[in-house]
Amino acid sequence: MSAQTTSMRDALYEAPGPKTRRRILIGTVIAGILVCLLVFLVVRQFYVTGQLSPKYWSFFTRPTTWRFLWDGFLGTLKVAAVAGAISLVLGLVLMLCRTSHLKALNVPARIVIEFFRGVPSLLLVYFFFLVVPQYGIKMSSFWMITLPVGLAASGVLAEVFRAGVNAVPKGQVEAAMSLGMRPSKITFKIVLPQAIRFVIPSLISQFVVVVKDTTVAYVVSYPDLLQNARVLISNYDALVSTYFVIAVIYIIVNYLINRAAVTVSRRTGVKIIK
Amino acid sequence: MSSEQNTGSEVAGQVPMIELRHVEKHFGDLHVLRDINLKVGKGEVLVVIGPSGSGKSTMCRTINRLETIDSGEILIDGKPLPEEGRELAAARAELGMVFQSFNLFAHRTILDNVTMGPIEVQGVPRKEAEESAMALLERVGVAEQAAKVPAQLSGGQQQRVAIARSLAMHPKAMMFDEPTSALDPEMINEVLEVMVELARGGMTMVVVTHEMSFARRVANRVVFMADGTIMEEGSPDEFFDHPTTERARDFLDSIKGH
């Protein structure tokens, strides 16, 4: 997101003068030294406690370890993709109801959106894991994780879509009205196509949240990346090294998603609305 | 069409194209339209001028109900303007509107902007709509831009496309809400030329503008508004050369200043 932060900094602060530049340099050097020191202390502590010993790391040279993690990674992707698709469709529907002039639609939509936005996804997972089966509804562990993650995200996406709709200039609607277009046509032909274009980068970066939410899959024992990592940990008794590796994987995946958002936003000239 | 020609509303027995009767409107405590009575005859070109905040844009926008009114009546071709639904949409389809900020559909090409109304509202087949759209774009001088999107055009070009978009609906009358106010000076004339052309072709027009040269050339009548009322109306020559009210004299002095 470097391009965005640079432009944001340019927008917020004036260009530094000679004194400020020196102060920035000094601050940067001191901060750099402190960070190096911190890293050194952490690594040293790991060394002292034996976390760096080969027994905790050698199993990462075995292909089976990686195949197992790969399976988990695919599980994560599958849950994230399906939950993402659910949240896109449901978010759009919720937003349309929320912006409807009919009280019968917009009041329930508002409640549902606030509910999904407000309730932690872990609680929703517990609901599908513990409560739903009591009513005799049988669900696979895949759906027990995918549904709640998708529902939680749909509340947020409804608001993202709404921000996009609000960003469409009023004149666009007035021009369409003056041509004699009916409200539904105006929504689907004029407003939504522009609104969606505005929010595509925000939707992509929201996908990061979905990916992170999938990690609660361990609650329902669905074999996602984190769940498989936990299996590795209990097999090899290697907590720090395993968590370290999968943290790096999550960071890379989410970094790539964010890069995609920035690329799309730059290509379409659209700002990321949050 | 010369200014000496009978204004439509004065022709005996003819129904005015647009008529406002005792129209009142408030924005909260602000009384923006006070007892507006106005007739625009068929083929008449009416220019509305006045200081900002006088209610002239609001009045213009009430004619196709982009602004609602508190009381009074608005008649289009003798029929009351519907208040909602399919009927209102149908009435709007027969009235063209050109905005200060063009309001071209930003996500569609120039050609799509002009064909959108005929295709989506009137059910004209695409091929036919595209042919007449190209003819209209030719007429306003932007045919070679048809495949571009609005942001790639200059303001003057965009406004001409906006006029073509309205014309594509074959409107009975057209409203222009300060059509040149957002334009760079060098682009004002290309838009005014298109409007002069339209006026000469017999289009009924309500034009909110400060362009006095335009008013003198094509207006049949000038209406001066201030504080939500019509203070004065008359032929362009009468009004610009011999304004009767103090307000109108002050206003004309202030815009003649440059």
Image (cartoon, coloured by chain):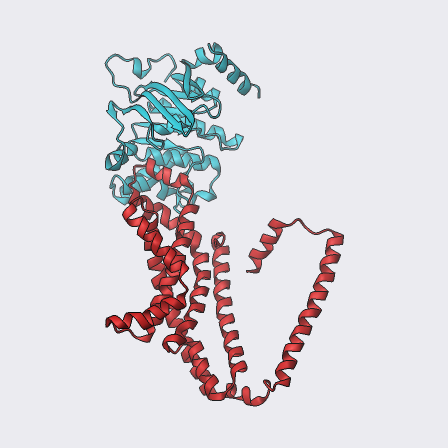
Q: Is residue B92 visible?
A: yes
- What is the drawing colour of chain A? red
Could you tell whether B86 is left or right of B32 in the image?
left
Q: Which residue is situated farthest in the bottom direction here?
A: A55
The residue nearer to you, when weighing A155 against B202, is A155
The cyan chain is B
A206, A236: nearer the viewer:
A236
Q: Quadrant of the N terminus of chain A?
A: bottom right
Q: Residue at x 70, y 63 (%)?
A: A28
Q: Quadrant of residue B237?
A: top left
Total marks placed:
0
- Where is B192 relative to B123, above or below? above
| Residue B20 drawn above or below residue B145 | above
State the image quarter where residue A44 is shown.
bottom right
Q: Position of residue A231 (x, y in %)?
A: 44, 83
- Which residue is more in the foreground, A264 or A234? A234
Residue B180: % across, % down: 47, 30
Horizontal and vertical percent position of residue A235: 46, 88
In the rendered view, tell whether residue B254 sits above or below residue A10: above
- Relative depth, front residue between B109 and A74: A74
Image point (33%, 25%), residue name: B203
Check the image and report above or below for A68 versus A111.
Answer: below
In this view of the protein, can residue A143 be seen by the observer? no
Q: Name which residue lies at 44% across and 37% down.
A: B158
Residue B212 location, x and y as percent?
48, 20
